[in-house]
Image (cartoon, helix red, strand yellow):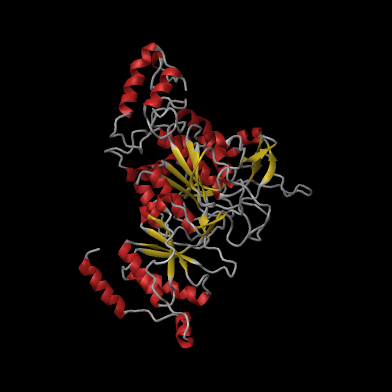
Amino acid sequence: MPTLQRLILVILALLLSVAPSARAQHDDATGGGENGESSGSGDDRENGDDGENGDDGENEEGDGPGQVLIRGDDWQQETARRWLSDRGYSITPVSEYPVFSIWLYDFDAGVLGDEDAANVRQILEDLVSLQLIEDGEFNLPMSVELGVGQTGSLWVSGMSAGRFDSQYGFTAINQAATSAHASGAGVIVAIIDSGLIPGAGLSRTYSMNRSYDFVNHTGLVPGIPSSDTGDGINGNGINGADEGVGHGTFVASLIGRVAPLAKHLHMKVLDDEGTCKLSSVVAALQACMNENVHVVNLSLVPSTRTRFLKFPINTVRMNGSIVIASAGNTANPINPFTESEPDLIQVGAVDSVNAVWTNSPTNAAWVDVMAPGVSNLSTASGSANSVLPGQWVIGEYGSVNGVTAYAAASGTSFSAAFVTGAAAAFRSANPDWPNASMPAANIADEFRVRMQEADDSANTIKRLRAYAIVEQDPAVPSCEGDIVPFGLNGQVSCCRTPADDFVYYSQLDLHLSPSHDLRRILRADLDRDRDVDQADLARLITNPCN
């Protein structure tokens, strides 16, 4: 922002200065509550580039806001700190998210009461309207749950692998043809969720050999993720204990079936009750930028509508990622991701006969597509929690004695997983994007257009038709790590013959070029470490089919 413009805004801000809060007036009257400096002195707990979110903002003294997020450059951050301090609300930095110019702060006084929260809300709105900051928001909770306590993901255990394979959702979107045509090879899908359950048999096969953990404050974690565990305690007093455990595993299993060769980068933000803070999602989106992921799955929603994620989500989309979000399980016609409609693909749920789920938002212009997400339960006497045959959405829920365990559930989280798989297939079918004809910022828009065109029905909100989205694109080689477009007699093959050597080496040389855009699909990355180098060449020579 130009210096003269800032000077004018500062003068205007002083003229329109907001009155001190009730807390500040009380402190002045009693001689206490000295504000001191609020420019970040003291414990300045920066988190570095990995986006760890430090303190999660919970406080046993109350359930009001205890933290605030502010977006703006250094001058704007300093301005916000001084404005809040002058009005009795001093704050201390906790974490920085430099990709988005966002800082997370603690309120030095702890959790705010209703009156003080309303005062701070007004201060933030004034700062934004005066262009003294870009945006500000309390560190709101986010969740996979319904608004006031009931879960939208009621696990019905005891399902089988056979039922998983035969569920109506795969048939409805034509999963078999989609996976055969565009396998997801070379695509990285970020799953911002609860992580993987230890020993998850199916979903771990899709996982990259590293992950991120923003719950236990460890950031980037090497090895197969296995951080989704519970403590046996009903920590939020809602439903049962550990109700969020298994959510990310369930989502991953559905994505993996639709795009079986896509690799999953798990980003754990949800605790064992299925909740998190806004700052954890900001940290995960920052990691998506650093990783140049192709698709993002966000099967959770803010508890209160907020525009604060608009800029981070837009930044990720402009970088070439397709961001998929669940529409929520409350049938609320108001979008919880305020002003993010151009950047998000938001998904509602339909059942086995294509009817919209009663808990899914309907007739909402911000819902882009409907996808399978409903397990209908029997109402017959003595059949509690019995899923009606052929009317289930099933995913991996964990493992029992080393054997993959499956459960049925309902929720737009799982509808979003089907769409995420379709997006991964779509992305793998267009490996040269971004390029001059398809800039990074347009990739998500193209996917949205394809989705709308794929369903030629009269439905106001279109249904997911995954194969129709990708069938116009060239078929993707169906073996992991394949960099050979043609084998013997022009057939797709992952096995090398002497006659094919020139194809391998010429393509490997192309991908080794330092100018290669890492947002494109690295079909030559045989060892899946995100780099194409001599290690891939050695693997190619010694083990050409893998």
Q: Which residue is drawn at 44% across and 71% down?
A: 121
Marker count (numbered): 0
Q: In this view, does 124 lie above or below 266?
A: below
Quadrant including the N terminus: bottom left
Residue 388 shows up from this direction: no
Q: Which residue is drawn at 68% across and 45% down?
A: 156
Looking at this view, name the residue that lies furthest to the front: 42
- In depth, the one of 105 and 116 nearer the eye is 105
Q: Which residue is drawn at 66% across and 38% down?
A: 399
Looking at this view, name the residue that lies furthest to the bottom: 29
Q: Where is residue 233 in the image (x, y as percent from the top left)?
A: 68, 55
Q: Is residue 498 left or right of residue 8?
A: right
Looking at this view, name the residue that lies furthest to the left: 4
Q: Where is residue 123 in the image (x, y as percent from the top left)?
A: 40, 73
Q: In this view, does 189 lie above or below 489?
A: below
Looking at this view, name the residue that lies furthest to the top: 498
Q: Is residue 28 left or right of residue 5?
A: right
Which image quadrant is residue 375 in? top right
Q: Where is residue 414 in the image (x, y as percent from the top left)?
A: 56, 45
Which image quadrant is residue 14 in? bottom left
Q: Is residue 31 left or right of residue 18?
A: right
Q: Is residue 432 left or right of residue 146?
A: left
Residue 443 shows up from this direction: yes
- In depth, the one of 483 and 361 nearer the eye is 483
- In depth, the one of 113 and 109 nearer the eye is 109
